[in-house]
Image (spheres, coloured by chain):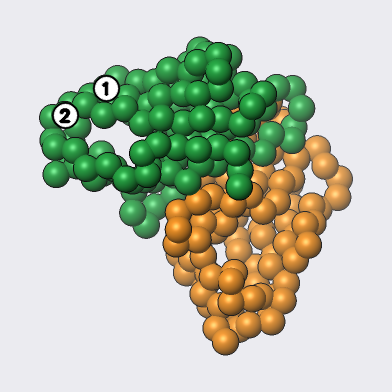
Amino acid sequence: ETGVTQSPTHLIKTRGQQVTLRCSSQSGHNTVSWYQQALGQGPQFIFQYYREEENGRGNFPPRFSGLQFPNYSSELNVNALELDDSALYLCASSLAGDLADTEAFFGQGTRLTVV
Amino acid sequence: AQKITQTQPGMFVQEKEAVTLDCTYDTSDPSYGLFWYKQPSSGEMIFLIYQGSYDQQNATEGRYSLNFQKARKSANLVISASQLGDSAMYFCAMSNTGGFKTIFGAGTRLFVKA
């Protein structure tokens, strides 16, 4: 148990639709990161939120957007879904700062299938 | 730009033997952290071990140890006394100063044979 929960666990959407994935971070963690993991590959960094502001972004188009709320929850929104968006989406919460030991705690993931 | 490279797509090891999973990295950041995660078929990412770039000693956590060679930019994971439950995907990851923007390698699938 990492204390990080994601919902839903599985989701099927149609191409062109919009989807919202949710993550509840560990209490006190100020940072949440979202990753996309295609089948058989490593997680790809989508973006990171630190104290409710986007702090960094990977090579993902603007139709991938997010929010982080003061209650340690966050959202990943994807507009205009494409078939290639089918993947496992992972969120990870951590307490980032000046200290080096910044282990990230992952949720169990949301498996998104776009048909 | 930061980069993590895992060159072993798959590895086999006999139960009770030791195995080394390779990881090399590239970064221009003077301070960084290196991690290893295990991902069973269930999909969850399980933290195994952490090494800070300024740590003098190699990190150890039970049967896991990290062979950190800073000059070579390598951070290999050593699993001693392999168990059948160690069969999984293993990912090497790196974060920059303050733990921001952790990136992952492509992973190594480990198979433990009875």
Q: Is residue A22 above or below residue B104?
A: above
In depth, the one of B43 and A6 nearer the eye is A6
Q: Amino acid at mark 2?
A: Gln
**Residue A94 locus on image (x, y percent):** 63, 31
- The residue to which callout 2 is attached is A17
Q: Any idea which chain is the orange one in this picture?
A: B
Q: Does residue B77 appear in this view? A: yes
Q: Any idea which chain is the green one in this picture?
A: A
Q: Is disc 2 placed on a helix, strand or loop?
A: loop
**Residue A1 locus on image (x, y percent):** 61, 47
Instruction: Judge depth for marks 1 and 2 and give the one in front.
Output: 2
In depth, the one of B91 and A72 nearer the eye is A72
Q: Residue at x 41, y 24 (%)?
A: A75
**Residue A67 locus on image (x, y percent):** 43, 17
Q: Does residue B6 appear in this view? A: no
Count of marks overlaid on the render: 2
- The residue to which callout 1 is attached is A63
